[in-house]
Image (tube, helix red, strand yellow):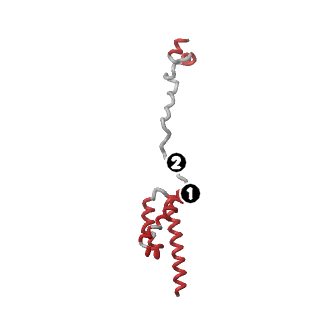
């Protein structure tokens, strides 16, 4: 029995037919990779939408370079928000946030323009 322990085979394996490499026994399980998968953590949909809203709000600061553009921000915003949406097309949450900012800005601009237009008539 001491000879069997030196070879790494216990008595029950010796009686059953050997060290597990003969027919009838399965191969040892494959080892786990040494490191966990390097996939990035999943993104929260709400967080992505809020990032898009924040980015859209920051992009609305661009017309400060040419303040006259704020008079037509409802249309001018398409010049920088559409390319941003194309650039972020693989992140639908951020695109959705940009669309929210685009819609709110467009409607607010239209309402203000309508109010001023009616007030002047």
Residue 43: x and y in percent read 53, 52
Identity of the residue drawn at 51% across and 72% down: 106
Relative to 19, does residue 113 appear above or below in the rendering?
Answer: below
Point out the residue furthest to the right here: 12
Q: Secondary structure at mark 1?
A: helix
Residue 121: x and y in percent read 52, 87
Identity of the residue drawn at 46% across and 67% down: 61
In the rendered structure, which disc, 2 or 1, sits on the residue that comes first in sequence? 2
Identity of the residue drawn at 52% across and 86% down: 120
The one of 52 and 63 positioned closer to us in this rendering: 63
Relative to 1, does residue 85 appear above or below in the rendering?
Answer: below
Q: Secondary structure at mark 2?
A: loop
Residue 89: x and y in percent read 45, 59
Q: Quadrant of the N terminus?
A: top right
**Which residue is identified by label 1?**
46
| Neighbourhood count class around disc 2 (C-alpha, 10 Å): few under 14, some 14–19, many 20 upward | few
Identity of the residue drawn at 53% across and 80% down: 114
* Res. 41 mark: 2
């Amino acid at each position: 029995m001491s000879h069997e322990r030196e070879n790494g085979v216990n008595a029950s394996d010796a009686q059953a037919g050997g060290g597990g490499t003969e027919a009838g026994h399965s191969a040892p399980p494959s080892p786990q990779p040494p490191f966990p998968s390097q996939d990035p953590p999943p993104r929260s949909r709400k967080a992505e939408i809020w990032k898009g809203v924040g980015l859209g709000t920051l992009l609305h600061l661009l017309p400060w370079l040419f303040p006259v553009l704020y008079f037509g921000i409802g249309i001018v915003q398409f010049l920088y928000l559409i390319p941003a949406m194309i650039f972020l097309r693989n992140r639908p949450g951020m695109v959705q946030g940009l669309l929210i900012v685009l819609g709110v800005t467009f409607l607010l601009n239209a309402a203000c323009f309508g109010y001023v237009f009616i007030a002047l008539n």
